Image (spheres, grey):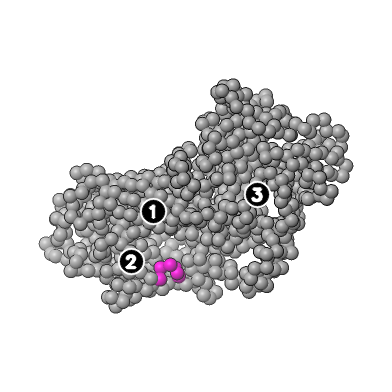
Amino acid sequence: MLNNNSQKHYLLFFFLILSSSVCAQNRASGKIVDEKNNKELNKVDIFINNDKTPSLTTTSGNFTIQSDSIIQKLKFSRKGYTTETLDITSENAENIFVQLSQAKVSDIQEIVLQSGKTKYKNKKENPAYAIMQKVWARKRNNGLEKFDTYSYKEYEKTQFDLNNLDSAFMKKKIFNKLDFIFSYADSTASGRLGLPIFLNEAVYENYGKNRPDKDSKRTLVAQKTSGFQDNQVITVSAKNLYRDINIYDNTLNYFDIGFQSPVGSDGFSTYDYSLMDTITIRGEKAFQIRYQPKRKDILAFQGNLYIDTDTYAVLGATLKSTQKINVNFVNSVYTQLEYDNPDDETFLPKKLITEFEMSPFSKKKGSKSIIAKRSVDYSEYQFNKPLDPKVFKRTEEEYEDKFTNKDDAYWVKARPDTLSKAEQGVYNMLDQLQQTPKFNRMVKLFETLGSRYYNAFKGIDIGPIFSIYGRNEVEGNRIRLGARSYFGLNDPWRVQFYTAYGFKDQQFKYGVEARYMFNRLNRFMIGAGTSRDIVQLGGQLTSGDGVASRSLSSSTFFARGENISLSSVNQTSVFAAIEPWKNFQIRVDGMMQSIKSAIPEKFNLMYYKDGQLRQTVNDSHVTISLIAKPGAKFSQTGIDRYQARNLAPTIVLRYTRGIEGLFNADFNYDKLQFMFNKPFLIGSMGKLVVNLEAGKNFNTVPLAIQNIIPANLSYGLVPNTFSQLNYYEFVADAYTTLQLEHHFNGKILSYIPLIKKLKLREVAFIRGAYGTLSDASKAINVEGFRYSAPSEHIYYEYGFGIENIGIGNLRIFRVDFNWRGNYLDRPDISKFGVKAGFQVGF
């Protein structure tokens, strides 16, 4: 089953991704500094091999240069400085550190790396192993943890570039009337064009304290965006690509996939290390250690480590993925890290550069792709200075639209390096593009696919477009049309409704909901809604009370068996919610509903009340929910927010009180529910997703408002359900369910010849449920004898899946094989089943 946010994050890549990767010998990168003061130098001419004209003139201290031919030599020349020439090999083509001086440079050849690989009888003979042992023994922690208080500034630049554009590409019909954008492109060393299409600059102020109590705050104080900043798809995509990493961790998180760290304490199980040379970095002597994975088809890196010769601290590192990287949409990953080391126990981040080369379909060198690059500079560290308690409090001013608007003079001062000519041109290019009808039509198309809504008029969206058609036993073919208000990303209010018609029952259904947020600081909001619809109850255990959503299982038209367990539900609800602390919400819902069977002749919901037989349950209840998402990141501040994908958990604690007599309600009852969901990176073994739910009804209630262990009769993938159960097969007053799903990321299949070339990934899962159902809860229902809980044994099912099925970079199909573990003597059960669906992700 597709996650709505996931669809938004990746659909845009099918539109943007356009350039090609180059092999190591055709590409070189590094930094150029003044030898005396280590200040980064720009305006340096770089010549490839024996060329008489420069292939690149740098605009900052960092450079990346490409060539159609193999780069064997680079010459660096700047007015007033001594010209330097370096030999380039495939091993030293990255993180070149060049020091230019007005005086004679005494030892620039220290940068030249050794070629070849020395073989040792055992790792103890390898001098690099002795160095790495000392690094592990002196493993450092982020220095921010040792100070009572700290503060620092952070400058972040995120950019998307179309790379390696050629004349044939620029003549494609899609660019008719848009060809002016290529005037903003810059020539690369390959002779082709690179075109920036998205640029975001941001400045953050960070404050923290560790004693006497712990607190921290990261405030966005300035932001400047060009490109598709009004498109919610790319806004979420840009934020969702990058993760903060610590080189000392055993596992590095890229795309929520674990890569083995070359500085991790178990690095020798994954990497071969070679001591290459001793060089000078920022005035400090450092060992240069080359590392590469023992196997090329695993999630690992290759590159260089720069280790201080005295303290064995990591001064810098480069991490480059192998050519066989098994990550969807990604051709290559490159990261450059720089650290300061204030003492023998800690480090401080100095600079981080991460670059992804991405393509929707192919990893071949000739495929078109996009370069997504993020650079972060950390500066102005201050420690143990008194901090005003007010700096840790959120203010309403921070959420104002104009809070981050700064003039050009501010940005000239805030940038560590000046923008390139091409980067500066993005702002002008966007102004022209927004005046072009064809471009606006293209943006509207992809906004529709990403958001699932079509903007029909100003402030009015039609949709969701993927919910228009459905089918079930009661309604037959079903048509659903809906709309919502939408004026912008940060709307403080939203009204939405839908109407549906079933051609079999010839009945109209509807739902309408309105929400308003009073304060973006604490997200205090209220809402109300009402609906009349056909619903599959029990599709989720810990479900919300919103009326605008619809259960997937009631619209399934590819499923095993007939679904006759549908209910006719009329409901009206109100709610209020507030976030007193960041990522912690308190929500109160009040609901009045009436429930009856949608097919009385086949599905019986009749029950006994005071000796009378009834077919409709009238229920009024109040629900208090505590919802925590520590570490979650969101891209907007309006009534609807889009959560960026990361490893943040979701924790829900919910109490429901049914009130007899309120709006003619039939029952008093108390219900308590808990849910915990979180993905965990398990070193090089992949990612484990844990979903734990538990709950208890403390009173006797009929089937319509009882806890149902959720089943999935469709042939599609539906998370947190049981694939081999039937609807209402297990009913429980008290329940506990645990679902474990482990993604090995190809760890096992990569050992199998021929199969490993398919780049398939394996998934293993097991699901279990335990519960109890009292005799009173059975007796209250007319057909209570048919229902039971998994109390004799823990019900379980297990299986495995194959994901990453597809071609090239487009590998979004998954197939699961499910087995039922027990309760096999029941009639009409399914012992084995196959589920399949699209799973868009890295």
Of the 4 image quadrants, the one containing the N terminus is bottom left
Q: Which residue is mark 3?
A: 22
Residue interval drawn in magenta:
463-468
Q: Could you tell me the amino acid type at mark 1?
A: Val
Count neighbours of disc 1 (C-alpha within 10 A) and say few if under 14, some if 14 to 19, many if 20 or more: many
First of labels 3, 1 by sequence position:
3
Whole-percent x, y for residue 533 in the image: 32, 69
Instruction: Choose between 701 and 358: the one closer to the eye.
Output: 358
Instruction: Choose between 156 and 387: the one closer to the eye.
Output: 156
Measuring 53% from the left and 54% from the top, which residue is drawn there? 809
Give me the disc on residue 815.
1
How far apart are the two marked residues, 3 and 1, measured between alpha carbons? 34 Å
Which structural element holds mark 2? Answer: loop
Residue lying at the far left of the rendered structure: 611
First of labels 1, 2 by sequence position:
2
**40 horizontally vs 131: left or right:** right
Picture quadrant where residue 531 is located: bottom left
First of labels 3, 2 by sequence position:
3
Instruction: Choose between 524 and 404: the one closer to the eye.
Output: 404
Picture quadrant where residue 130 is located: top right
Q: Could you tell me the amino acid type at mark 3?
A: Val
Which structural element holds mark 3? Answer: loop
- Answer above or below: position of 473 versus 337: below
Whole-percent x, y for residue 3 in the image: 44, 57
Which structural element holds mark 1? Answer: strand
Q: Which residue is mark 2?
A: 557
How far apart are the two marked residues, 1 and 2, measured between alpha carbons? 18 Å
